[in-house]
Image (cartoon, rainbow, N blue to C red):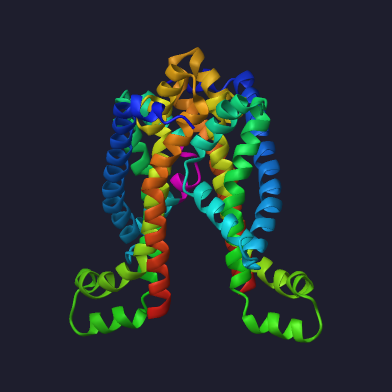
Amino acid sequence: MDFIDAYSADNLTFLLNGFWLTLKMALIAIILSFILGGFVGTLRFAKIPVLSQILAMIVEIIRNLPLLLIIFFTFFALPEIGIKFKEVPAAIIALTIFEAAMISEIIRSGLTSIDKGQMEAARSSGLSYFQALWHIILPQALRRMVPPTVSQFISLLKDTSLAVVISVPELTHHAQIVYGQKSTYLVPILLFVALMYFVVNYTLSVLSRRLEVKRT
Amino acid sequence: MNFSILTNNMDMFLQGFKVTIIASVTALIASLLLGAFIAVLRIAPYKPLNRLGTTYVEFFRNIPLLIITLFVYLVFNFKGITAGTIALTIYTTAFIAEAIRAGILSIPEGQMEAARSSGLTYSQAMRIVILPQAIKVVIPPLGNQFINLVKNSSLVAVIAGGDLMYQADLISARTFRVMDTYILVAMFYLVLTIPLSLGVSYLEKRLAKSN
């Protein structure tokens, strides 16, 4: 173990560079999966015949597969049918598909948790179904969705490390390059990387707990 | 879809399937035991123990499983499958400890007070009165953790653990049929995870009714 050499300015900048990409990927993926997941979750909640069932099946399949498989599939299998992505977009797409399935469930159960009377009252006051959903149900449900969404974001941030298998130059990949130089770097670098993920994720989970306490 | 890939490589698929199941079940049992222990640390009436339990849970919940896996594999030089199972256990323990703790805390305090005032010691009350009631609440989240465990066991492939994902890599490199191979592997995973997730939602519904 060689802590002083391992934590040289060059190495740390290199790791921070990787972490920057990790954060960017996670942020893009969470925004995209919130949009996609919101769409799917709402459609499932609206119980549109056939469509809702098909969506339910797709969501169940994606949720029950390993993310690693989805990443490999996006990057290695899709080119066989002519759909090619570079490493970073492939990772973001795979993460988005996987997390959108999770988030659609959060959104659906958030919507379901709002008392039925709210919808009935909104409808009988003359709003259309989607107006009632948008103006009455969604604003109330959103608040309940905050804590599970934050923990999903924490999972997402951890999951970005899997992009290393398709050589995306994010934090874990940069870590492998640094400890590849010298075996004595292994422990210090892995600890540093763990700490970086930890600091961001722990901050997020404390924030989400604060939000929860404030609300109740 | 070309099923000859399945029939020609059946032995590799089954070998990987076996390794995935063994790694998941072993890690589940180990992390149930460890998780129960950490959960008790977190609620025991003794501050330093609480802090120890909380530190474990907060640390391992907030770092990627892949980092833990690489650490165990590279630093301790275990075989891929051993290192993978240990890493899975370390990681899942944190989540299971939280599930068990939440289950115990969901039992009204009056239960513990009544048990204690009827002459039971703290650990007797825990074992005879609180835990049996908590188990009912804890089973659905534990089921979810097991599903996650099966999915997470795919990380063993990164350190050459010989699981389903790893075999998929070998088979696709040999047959050049990447999509067919991954679709087949996906089916093997779904055979494990879909029944589990149906079981969990059934139990959740029953629990909601009984409350």
User: Residue A112, relative to residue B50: is it above or below?
Assistant: below
The stretch in magenta equals B58-65
Rendered-image quadrant of the N terminus of chain A: top left
Percent position of residue A79, x then y:
62, 25
Between B125 and B6, the one nearer to me in the picture = B6
Residue A105 falls in which quadrant of the image? bottom right
- Place residue A18 in its image quadrant: top right
Q: Is residue A124 visible?
A: yes
Q: Residue at x 62, y 65 (%)?
A: A49
User: Is A34 situated above or below A142?
Assistant: above
Please say whether residue B61 is one of the residues in the magenta stretch: yes
A114 w.r.t. B48: above or below? below
Q: Residue at x 50, y 25 (%)?
A: B178
Residue B13 on image: x %, y %? 34, 31
Asked whether residue B51 is in view, the answer is no
For this rendering, which residue is in front, A162 or A126? Answer: A126
Q: Residue furthest right?
A: A126
